[in-house]
Image (cartoon, rainbow, N blue to C red):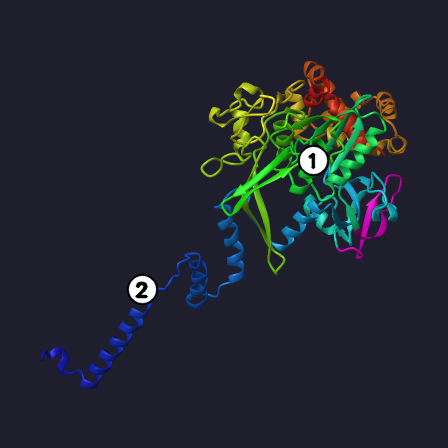
Amino acid sequence: MSNRFKSVPLSAVVIIFLLGALSFKIYTNFTTKRELQLSNNNWDKLSLILKQIDNHYVDTVNQEQITEEAIPFILEKLDPHSVYLAPEELTNAEEQLLGNFDGIGIQFNVPNDTAVVISVIPGGPSERAGLLSGDRLVKVDGEIVAGVKMDQDSLVKRLRGKSGSVVKVDVKRMGFDKLVSFDITRDKIPVKSIDVAYMVNDTLGYMKLSKFTRTSYTEFMEAVRELRKFGLSSLIFDLRGNSGGYFDQALLLSNEFLDKGSLIVYMQGRNRPRQDFFADNNGTCRDLGIKVLIDEGSASSSEIFAGAIQDNDRGQIIGRRSFGKGLVQEPIYFSDNSGIRLTVARFYTPTGRSIQKPYGSEDYYGDIIERYRHGEMFSADSIKINDSLKYTTPSGKVVYGGGGIIPDLFVPIDTVGVTPFLVKVSNQGIAFRFGASMADRFRSRINEISTLEDLDTFFEGAGMERRFLEFASDNGVNATQQEWDESKDVIMTQVKAFIGRYSPMDDNAFYPVLLKIDNVVQAAIGQ
């Protein structure tokens, strides 16, 4: 035995050996591969992983938070429209589609870091309490909301609440030095999906549908009945910017215009057999001409309606290629009030075109930017057409699949009046802010406006051009004479429309004025 170990007692050697053996056992427990048995369905690996984290991870883990963050990531790997909605998100999403929500019943804008009431909903809580158009929201339940750069969503959350609950609102009202306080009892607030409906001339009507909510069909039929009293025989139906909504509402509206047996749309998926939807011959609008306006913001139910009209040779589609959202989502709800929208099928137009544009490797939402880059927004010749996806309507008209509805009459983005001055005015919201300023200054006169003629008379007599140029200059935006000559008509029409929206006419002044410089609407009128 070497001299090194002669002085070490045998008992110490034994202890060292045992400690080494124990350390080795502990080490091997950490390093030995842990093999967990999977069933034939590998999806249970997700739950196994979460269980292992819960049982063995070095630190405390918030499993609820991990799950909430993992679910959206999983769904976004499927397709662009399968989504997870947390409880609050689900509630907000469904409120917008159901056609009502709990609140105080006002429309407002925020032109200069302070919310200004545009209008109060007739019969709503705010009207009953005494709020007026032009009031500025300063406090909500004692909290200052003016001049603190509060975003619009945060302000909406403070104003909304359960029906029957009370919110105190303090406003700055023109002509009063002190704040005016109101205790407003929240109630159910109807949400319009028809923004406006009016007669363009003796026989042609215009109607704008902003979304397909639970009440869209009812609103549409009421609007048509009113327009028929004034001689409606043909309708411009504006679906631009309408991103969709309830599928059944698109079916009901399509049915109004199609003869019995006409295929409206069909859907099909891996676990969903083909399902066809036909017109039942009960439509009351089959005598009306129909021109449908679409653009890159028209999606889903908008495309179903446009596709049904186009493929059945029922009317004319005017504008630019629609978004291309033809995936069917089925809602699935959980007991914690969250839910998912899971894609289960695809929509196909009557000729067999898939509405859905490609996704996966492509930049799905960046596709709109690409349309600008390769010129599609300015020329129909730049629309990418796949000849292998060519279809024919009953009349022999050729239509194309591959994503979105291509209009029968293409209308490019309007560049008339666009100058560096107009761009600066638009980017800084000068026209909008000026309109709010004029609504304040001439509140009593604007409150008396009840017709478009009244609005014209007021506008022409108030020296608006001079006032606007001074307002723009005060905000650091100046125009050369050439820029003003080119942009004047566009800008002053926008200003008039904004001021009209602050009058009792609201959207019934805003849209008729603004649509006079809308090249898509003007193209439809000229057809």
Q: Seen in the image, is 384 located left or right of residue 514?
A: left
Which image quadrant for residue 141? bottom right
In the rendered structure, which amino acid carries the disc numbered 1? Asn
Q: Read off the magenta span.
A: 162-187
Q: Up-down: is 357 above or below 375?
A: below
Image quadrant occupied by the C terminus: top right
Q: Residues within 10 Å of mark 2 (few under 14, many from 20)?
A: few
Q: What residue is pinned by disc 1?
A: 255
Q: Residue 413: image x %, image y %?
A: 62, 22
Cα–Cα gap, marks 1 and 2: 63 Å
* Residue 289 screen position, x and y as percent: 73, 24
Q: Is residue 438 visible?
A: no
Residue hosting label 2: 33
Question: Which residue is at the front of the view, 271 or 457?
Answer: 271
Viewer-nearest residue: 274 or 174: 274
Residue 321 in view, yes or no: yes
Quadrant holding the N terminus: bottom left
Foreground mark, 1 or 2, reads: 1
Magenta residue check for 171: yes
Residue 462 horizontal/vertical position (percent):
85, 23
419 shown above or below 56: above
Q: Earlier in the sequence, mark 1 or mark 2?
A: 2
SS at circle 2 = loop
The amino acid type found where label 2 is placed reads: Lys
What is the x, y in percent for residue 146?
75, 45
For residue 42, the mark is none
When the figure is inspected, residue 503 is found, relative to residue 492, above or below; the finding is below
**Quarter-of-image position of residue 258:** top right
Q: Is disc 1 surrounded by few (<14), some (14 to 19) or many (20+) residues within 10 Å?
A: many
Q: Secondary structure at mark 1?
A: helix
Residue sitting farthest toward the left: 1
Q: Nearer the viewer, residue 387 or 118?
A: 387
